[in-house]
Image (spheres, grey):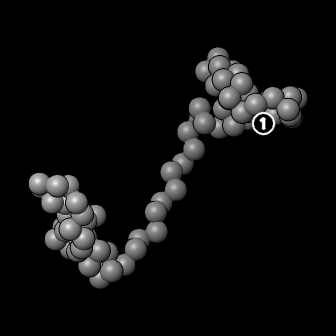
Amino acid sequence: MPNYCPNCGESLGGTTKGEVRKTARRAYEGEKPKKKRKASAYNKRYAREYKRLKKKHPRTSFAVLAKKAHKAARRKK
């Protein structure tokens, strides 16, 4: 992220010290692969409901189907 002039707000270019430190540390340590989070029981119910509704009503918009799927997922235990 560039520095900005306090008077006119124009970009002064370059990077901040913090940014340089972050990128150097990342390059030294290497990127660690992110762990995928486990799907919750609610998320699994929602996915099942959404797929069922999508199969039944393929031309309905995502927003409408998602609302109905969330409602059904909350209802079921």
Q: Is residue 42 above or below residue 22?
A: above
Residue in the image at 46% along x and 68% along y: 33
Q: Residue furthest bottom?
A: 28
- Within 10 Å of disc 1 (Cα), the crowding (few <14, some 14-19, many 20+) is some
Q: Residue furthest front?
A: 8
Identify which residue, 53 or 12, lies in the foreground: 12
Q: Position of residue 9 (x, y in %)?
A: 20, 55
Residue 43 quadrant: top right
* Relative to 5, 49 lies left or right: right
* Relative to 44, 37 lies left or right: left
Q: Is residue 12 above or below residue 28?
A: above
Q: Amino acid at mark 1?
A: Lys
- Quarter holding the N terminus is bottom left
Q: Which residue is mark 1?
A: 51
Q: Secondary structure at mark 1?
A: helix
Residue in the image at 41% along x and 71% along y: 32
Q: Is residue 76 visible?
A: no
Residue 40 quadrant: top right
Q: Position of residue 36 (x, y in %)?
A: 52, 56
Residue in the image at 66% along x and 23% along y: 67
Identify which residue, 61 or 35, lies in the foreground: 61
* Relative to 3, 43 lies left or right: right
Q: Position of residue 12 (x, y in %)?
A: 20, 68
Q: Residue furthest top?
A: 75
Q: Is residue 13 above or below residue 74?
A: below
Q: Position of residue 61 (x, y in %)?
A: 76, 31
Residue 26 quadrant: bottom left
Identify which residue, 13 or 52, lies in the foreground: 13
- Quarter holding the C terminus is top right
